[in-house]
Every structure is written in C-alpha cells, then in structure tokens.
Amino acid sequence: MIGLILIGAVFLALLELNKNSVLGWVLVLVAMAAFLFLRRVALADKAWYVKGLGWLGLVAVLTAILFCTQGPYLRRSAVEGKDPAVTEIVTVEQGQITGLTTADGAVEVYTGIPYAKPPVGELRWREPQDPEPWEGVLAADHFAPMSMQPSNGAIYGSLADIIGYHDYKITTRDNFRDVMSEDSLYLNIWKPAGEVKNAPVLVYIHGGSLMTGQPWYADYSGEGLARDGVVVVNMGYRLGVFGFYADPELAAESPNGTTGNYGLLDQIKALEWVRDNIAAFGGDPDNVTLAGESAGSACVTALCTSPLARGLFRRAIGESSTTTAPQPAHSYRSLEEAYAAGAATKEKFGAGSIADLRAVPAEELVAATNQNHHITVDGYVLTESPYESYRKGVHNEEAIFHGYNLTESALFTLFDNANLKNYEKKVRAYFGEYADEVLALYPAETDAQAKANWIDIYSAVFFNHGHYCWTRQALAGGIPAYEYFFTKSNRRLGGNHGGEEVYFYGNIPENSGLYDDSDRELGAVMHAYFRNFIATGDPNGDGLPTWNAVTDPTRIFELGENVGETDERWIALYAILDAMQGWEDR
C-alpha cells in the first residue's frame, strides 16, 4: 500500500508539472484503484515475480496516461476572466479590429494583429512583406502563436518556475500547451480605455537569447503602463534559425543583398506598422520609445545604429544586455561566422540549396536554433558594428535609459558554478593573458568566494560591461544617459536577470506574497521614472529622488533599498575588458 501511494504521488506530481488535462488525473486514480483491486483479488496468491510484473504494468500504464493526456494546444486570451467586454471598432490600414477591455474597464487590449505576411514557404528567410488586408472586423482577442523555438516541455517550465522564479501555483487554469508556429508576425497593443490622443508610445522587444520567448509574459505586460497613459506595443519576431540564419544564396536572392538579420527586419517592420497605425489607438507616432530586455535589449542597441530604423523611435530603453562593446559578449557574431553556421546547418539537413532547406518542416528545422541565433553585420540592417557606428557618432536615439541587475548571471551559472578547484581554470580559460589581473582583483580562498566571484565576473563580462560602453558612447555623442543598477532582493527573482521588469512595468501582483511593502514602494518609484522617461526623455518628476543624467561613467544610479547615486563596482574589471577588446574613446 505504501508503494502504491508513493508511485501515485509521483505520477500525480508529474501530471501537475506537465500541465496535463483533468482527464489524466482521473485516469491515474482509476488505474491505481484497478491495480489495488487486482493485488487483493487476482494476484493475491501469485508468485512474487508475477506481482512484480503487475507493478511494472502499473508504471507503464501511468506513463502512457502521462503522455496521452497532455493539455490541449490553446491560444491565450488577451484578457483574463470570463466574458470580457469587447472594445469599439478601431480602423487601421489593413481593416477594422476590436479588442477586449480589462475587468475594471481601465485598459483596452488588442492582440494578434498581423504586421506582416506569414513568413512561410517561399517567404522563409525573406524580408517581411506588408500584411494582407482583411474583410469584416478582425477580433484581436487572443495572442498569436509564439515563434518557432526549441521546447523542453511543460515539466521543464514548471521546474524553472519553482527553482528559478520561486513562483509556482497549482491550478487547473494552466492545464494547456501554448501554440507555436512559424506564422508568428503579429503584434499586441495595450492602451488606456476610451478616447486617447497623442499618448506616448512604448514598443517592447522580448528577450530569450534570440532563441525563445513570447509576447504575453505577465512581467512585461503593457497593462501597468497603459493604466498610466502609455500606449504599449510588443510583437512576435522570428527567432533562432528562422530569424538569424545566414547564407550567401539568400543574400544573392534578396533585392537588398541581406541575410542573417530577419528577426531584426521583423522588429523594424513592426515599428513601421506602429508609425503608420498607432494614432488610431491614441498613440503619438512622433513620441515612440523602443525598449527591450536581455536579447531584446541587444536588439534595441543594434536598431539604435541601423539606418533602416532611423526616425522610427526617439528614445531607447535597454535592460541587461547590449551590442555596444567592441566585442559583444553574446547575441552577435561576424558575417563569416554566420555563414559558417549556415553551411553547417545545410549539411546537417542534407540540403544542397536554400530550396531544399525551405522544404524542411519547421518542426524539424528548429533543431538548428542553437547554431543560428546571433545578430550580424549584413550590410543592410547593420552596415557596421554598433561599436563602430557609435565611434563615428552615428545613432538613432536622442536619450537612453538602461542598466543591469546585481546578480545578472546567478541563474545562468546555477549548474556551472565555480568552486575553489575549478575557479582559476575558468578565469584563465576566458581571460588568457589578463587572467592574473583578474585573479588579483577577485581572489578566492573558499568555495563560497569562488562561486560569488564567478557570478560577479560572469555578470560583468556578459551583461554589465556593454552598458558601461553604451554610457560612454552616449556621453561622447552628447545625449543624456540614465544608467541604473537594480539591487532589490525579494522572494522571487530579486536582483537576478529579469528581476527589474515587474517593477518598471508596474506589474507587481497585488496579492503575491513574494513581494512586500518595500517592493511595492520601490515599484511605484521605478515605474514613475520609467513612465516619465517614455513620455519626455527625462525620468524625473514631482516627489521622486533626483536622477541626474550621467556625467561620470564611474557613478551609477542604484534602485534598491537605496535610491540614488553610487559607485560603479566593476570599474577595474571593465578596464581589463576594454584592454582585451581594444576599446578606443571617440
């Protein structure tokens, strides 16, 4: 009986983590009851090995139930709750649409609006094309499918919520799987309800290493900003091999000679759609701020130097990543490297031509995502590296708001932590001839010190140094830069990667025990800074601690228990990275 209870508990837990349907729970309970009956009646006098086969049979049946009763594929509603009110009709260039209104009537949400033709078939790896007009009224009430990306399954996502986010809820409301498709070029809009005119606009690019991600995540939902008068837009864009595959054959067939930056071209297409249509939602097309987090922020910094994005936004917000260093640490590679990865991808699928590769089903091709998820200099979207453009004073934004968090790399090093035994080897492998200088800055005598040092070093290399570069580039270009350092701890993400978003976007859950009153007080301040910058290019406002634009890049603005200027703590390591990468002042 104890064994049956333990096996049942394990499979019921797996059903919950895997987001199986209620039917799965019922079938597991039925199977356990049937097994108990067999044990007491049919197998009561049988030999031990017969009973053993019975246990194996039970495990096999429960495993089959686990796989056969996975939740259905569903698209997420624009607004949670039963029977939300439908908005008035809005007319855009392609036709008429309606959205949904939040339960309190404060925000209108329009989701799944096509901003380009589906990039499928012959349009795979081509510049995004204008969307087709539609007849009748489009019900923009569900988010479009997420872009094609590797999937580790619902269990992996649940464990990430438990271990990484410390934010897992047992409920039947999430017993489904999100739809994924190559047809994903759709955008979403949150606006203050009712008549709105000339409101500031924020266009947001989600993160995910240019491999994963989706536009509906609650932390960066546009609802919090829309409640404060901002029209918010985000979009799906091509990811991984679909968004960043590069091949000379594709460059030759392109009328613009481009390849490798299809995801960036999608983002530019979305910005063009905003320019042409956002006034219909009350937004001011001449007051657009472009924002992104993680890989989305890397895209923002690339678009800040793209000639194609000129005039499509005025200001830029970048959270926890850039491509502004002489040698960006991630999300970027040379065209030669991109071509090499493209050739390897062709070989992997036995493709002799782009036509062959276009014939590979998306569900199979997605396996090549890890080799193809980097921005490159294609001569069209980017004519040179962002670092080179900034050195020449070439950029599109007139002010920047950006920064990083205290422990950016803690989650990334969770399963690759340093200890006293491997710490020096790790440092020497990355820093080479500069390793002695780094080890002198970060000596370690215990495992705990080695672990903490490696998180610090990894954070500076892969996230923080690029922001230090961007601030210096802004200073050289004579544009105001407001650089933050988020240090607040909480019971969820705290100062880890992504932990700041829920504060800036005004989306701290009201009833969550993972945040306390101090988080909500800081959230009100951070959200006000954020909203002010989006509206005017200056985060300051009545009742807020004064945040001056940077004049000394060794000083940074802390957002945490302390709100105010503090010393930049990685300056010595930044000097080493500058030397390694060949940084030159303008």
Image (spheres, rainbow, N blue to C red):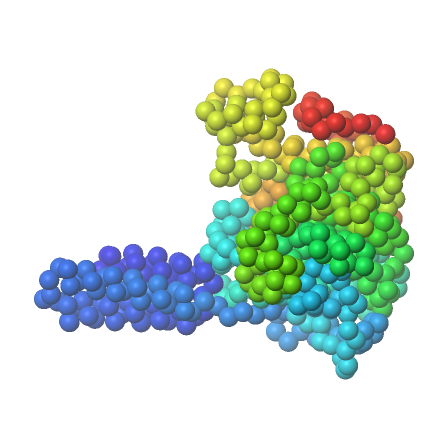
Residue positioned 48% across, 51% down in the render: 159
Residue positioned 74% across, 68% down in the render: 117
Q: Is residue 110 visible?
A: no
Residue positioned 77% across, 28% down in the render: 583
User: Is residue 328 or residue 125 the one in the foreground?
Assistant: 125
Q: Is residue 278 visible?
A: yes
**Percent position of residue 564, x then y:** 75, 33
**Percent position of residue 274, x then y:** 82, 62
**Percent position of residue 368, x then y:** 57, 53
Which image quadrant is residue 31 in?
A: bottom left
Q: Is residue 574 left or right of residue 537?
A: left
User: Is residue 14 or residue 106 the one in the foreground?
Assistant: 14
Which image quadrant is residue 437 in?
A: top right
Q: Is residue 53 left or right of residue 152?
A: left
Residue positioned 55% across, 57% down in the render: 350
**Percent position of residue 484, x then y:** 74, 37
Residue at the extreme front of the image, as rendered: 352
Q: Quadrant of the N terminus?
A: bottom left
Q: Is residue 233 left or right of residue 180?
A: right
Q: How many marks?
A: 0
Q: Is residue 307 above or below residue 84?
A: above
Which image quadrant is residue 187 in?
A: bottom right
Q: Quadrant of the C terminus?
A: top right
